[in-house]
Image: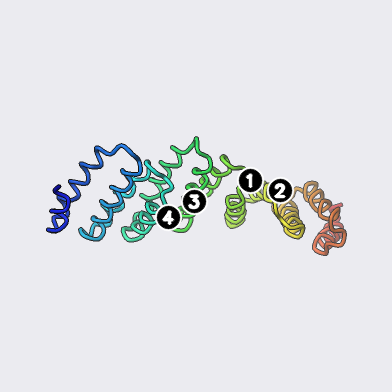
Amino acid sequence: MLEPVYSSTGSYEKLVDVLEVQLAHAQENADKVALLHRIAEIYETALDNPRAAFDANARAMPADPLNETTLSNIEKLAEVAQAWPDLVKVYDQEIDRLAGSPEQLVELALRTADIYEVRVGNVEAAIERHKRVLGADDRNPTAIKSLDRLYEGLERWKELADILRKEIELPELSSDDVIALRFRLAQVLEHRLQDIDAALAAYKEILEVSADHAPTVDALEQMFTRGVR
């Protein structure tokens, strides 16, 4: 009964109090999320308190971790309040809770990895979240390709070689894509890891499917010129 009165009179703090009482008695997750969205909206638009709005959206996460409205709003508020480090903490907590729901874990962990890399500037944390994704879905192309890029940028050659081997096995790659990946792997093995036997094996695999692959032929000729084999 008091809700419309407080709304019409602009008593927004009291309106939030009423909604919090309703929230305490809500049984369904959908009802909890809807109430928290209303609370967040009041904090953001009527009370000009983006941090409190952020916190209200964070409280909605356990009830529905992948609710698109929650995710969209909380990320918008993280930008306004410069609360990206707090946001990844919220997301990490939900990732831990989603251990038994691999599809949901993958979606949220990928989102979290991107925020760690782009917004927080913590590449190592981004890598760890991509690895969490592979723990739930070991052929996830987004995580594999992201790790490829990140390992190469960090010059972590052993890890890059390992992830290239996984990337080569991804489905729906064209034959040209596979050859390009095998050649990258061979180059890393030869020039970065000095694993000549493994590099030769990788080059051989390329020639078995493309005998005239010019970069591979050139690489082998250079190796033989140097007396490697």
Between the C-alphas of marks 2 and 3, the distance is 23 Å
Residue on which disc 2 sits? 169
Q: Are marks 2 and 3 in contact (CB under 8 Å)?
A: no
Q: Amino acid at mark 3?
A: Ala
Q: Position of residue 56 (x, y in %)?
A: 29, 49
140 left or right of 51 in image: right
Which type of secondary structure does the marked residue at label 2 adopt?
Answer: loop
Q: Label 4 near label 2: C-beta < 8 Å?
A: no
Circle 2 or circle 3, nearest the eye: 2
Mark 3–mark 4 CB contact (< 8 Å): no
Q: CA distance from mark 2 to mark 4?
A: 31 Å
Label 1 vs label 3: CA separation? 17 Å
How many C-alpha atoms fall within 10 Å of the one at disc 2: few (<14), some, or many (≥20)?
few
Quote the CA–CA distance across marks 1 and 2: 8 Å
The disc, 1 or 3, on the residue closer to the chain's N-terminal end is 3
Q: Earlier in the sequence, mark 2 or mark 4?
A: 4
For label 4, the crowd category at 10 Å Cα-Cα, with few meaning under 14, some 14 to 19 and many 20 or more, is some
* Residue 80 in picture, x, y percent from top left: 32, 61
Nearer to the camera, 201 or 222: 201
Residue position for label 4: 120
What amino acid type should be assigned to the residue bearing mark 1? Arg
Q: Residues within 10 Å of mark 3 (few under 14, many from 20)?
A: many
Pointer 1 with pointer 2, Cβ within 8 A: yes
Tell me: residue 84, above or below residue 212.
above
Q: Earlier in the sequence, mark 1 or mark 4?
A: 4
